[in-house]
Amino acid sequence: MTAVSAETAEGFIRQVAHSFGKACDSYLPAARLQQQVALDALALLPADKQGHLLDLGCGPGWIHPRFASYCNQFSAADLSAGMLAKAATQQLATNYVQADAQQLPLAAHSVDKLFSSLMLQWCPKPAAVFAEIDRILAPGGRVVLTTLVDGTLAELKQAFARVDTLAHVNHFLPAAAVVAAAESVSTINWQFEQRCYPLFYPDVVSLARELKALGANQVAGRQSRGLTGKGYWQSLAAAYDDNRTTLGLPASYQVLIISGYKNAN
Ligand SMILES: C[S@@+](CC[C@H](N)C(=O)[O-])C[C@H]1O[C@@H](n2cnc3c(N)ncnc32)[C@H](O)[C@@H]1O
């Protein structure tokens, strides 16, 4: 998201919570990118069965059975009550906390390992999330985060731009802006790696359906809901089809993988 007023940011946060809440049952079958990215990210945490881990923006908690190798207890936090309730059906975490990552109700230095996959791009103020991570992470603690950055869904954005001038796809921050937000926290030693995950779809409707099933169809500052009409979808499909490969229609997801450790003192 770009810089927005406090009022707009609050409205957007409410929409995001609502949208992910509605998707809590349809999310997992649609989450092929999310599963690939989170498993790649988890491999960057030390698998030493030690300490208190926090899964920030946990979604339905499909990854939670894996945490047994990474910590001796974990907490799960999410903005969406629906997602958190879904995660809680497993009863694997010590605590399930409904909270905004930009303002966490967790004590200072209470977390040894922080894991957060594909949540940060939904937060209007990434610097506030990094400040909270700095506050709750214990000295010597580790953090692994992933987020979508600029270039994500570029093909879809370009196809929409050939049909009308409205914002239909979320704005993803440039990687450099996310890096700068992380680096505003100097007690954590950061490493960054950008990877492209291409996914393929039979047609543009399948891509739109997947985004809806994930709850990832909120667009900050959308001027109109207006995706109606057969003619509109036909024009969009024709515009997207210029990208077609033998594998289908490509959609690029640009993922920034951020890892860090906090100075021991
Ligand atoms: C794409 S899902 C990722 C879920 C899970 N981490 C995964 O990898 O499958 C994003 C999650 O972040 C949550 N989320 C979005 N904004 C948040 C915020 N400001 N604070 C906490 N959670 C947030 C959403 O409710 C949703 O469950």
Image: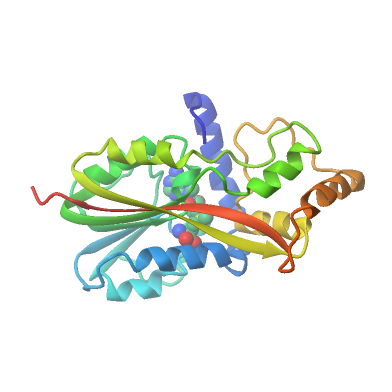
To which quarter of the image does residue 143 belong? Answer: bottom left
Q: Residue at x 41, y 66 (%)?
A: 40
The answer to whether any part of residue 189 appears in the image is: yes
Q: Position of residue 16 (x, y in %)?
A: 55, 44
Is residue 264 shown left or right of residue 121?
left
Along the line of sight, which residue is nearer the eye, 228 or 239? Answer: 239
Total residue callouts: 0
Query: Image height check: is 162 above or below 26?
Result: above
Q: Residue at x 56, y 54 (%)?
A: 253
Q: Position of residue 186 (x, y in %)?
A: 21, 39
- Residue extending farthest to the right is 231
Question: What colouring style does the render use?
Answer: rainbow
To which quarter of the image does residue 15 belong? Answer: top right
Along the line of sight, which residue is nearer the eye, 166 or 26? Answer: 166
Q: Residue at x 63, y 46 (%)?
A: 154
Q: Position of residue 211 (x, y in %)?
A: 65, 55
Is residue 94 shown left or right of residue 13?
left
Along the line of sight, which residue is nearer the eye, 19 or 191? Answer: 191
Q: Position of residue 251 (x, y in %)?
A: 65, 56
The answer to whether any part of residue 81 appears in the image is: no
Is residue 20 shown left or right of residue 251?
left
Query: Image height check: is 10 above or below 153?
Result: above
To which quarter of the image does residue 108 belong? Answer: top left
